[in-house]
Amino acid sequence: MSLLKNKFELYTQLHLNDDTILNWQYWEFEQHIKFLNEKNKEENKRRKEENDQSQAAMPNMSNWNPSSMMKSAGR
């Protein structure tokens, strides 16, 4: 990611101001970015797992034929 995107991530997710970030050594900045990247990766993994679970809980509608439902309702 670009430097600007990384700074924006720090501003928005850790609620830091520009003075705080500018006073860091470069290695501190890198460590915070690594932390954010790990946090984002874990969040994305959790969302994917939740999405997969919700998809698994839903019935498979790919084979559903509305005319078969109408036929059985007519009987």
Image: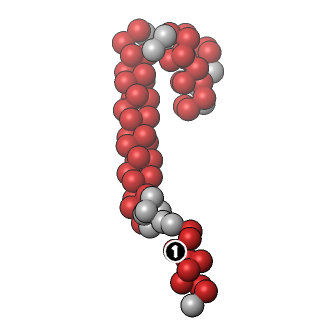
Outermost residue to the bottom: 75
Looking at the picture, tell me which residue is in the foreground, 24 or 57.
57
Residue 31: x and y, percent? 37, 21
Q: Tell me the quadrant of the picture where the C terminus can be found.
A: bottom right
The foreground one among 49 and 19 is 49
The local secondary structure at tag 1 comes to helix
Identify the residue at image location x=56%, y=68%.
Answer: 66
Mark 1 crowdedness (10 Å alpha carbons): few <14, some 14-19, many ≥20: few
Picture layout, residue 62 above or below residue 30: below
User: Which residue: 56% across, 32% down?
Assistant: 13
State the image quarter where residue 63 is shown: bottom left
The answer to whether residue 28 is seen in the rendering is no
Q: Which residue is mark 1?
A: 68
Q: Amino acid at mark 1?
A: Ser
Relative height, residue 74 to residue 43 (above, below): below
Residue at image position (62%, 15%) is 18
Whole-percent x, y for residue 46 in the image: 40, 48
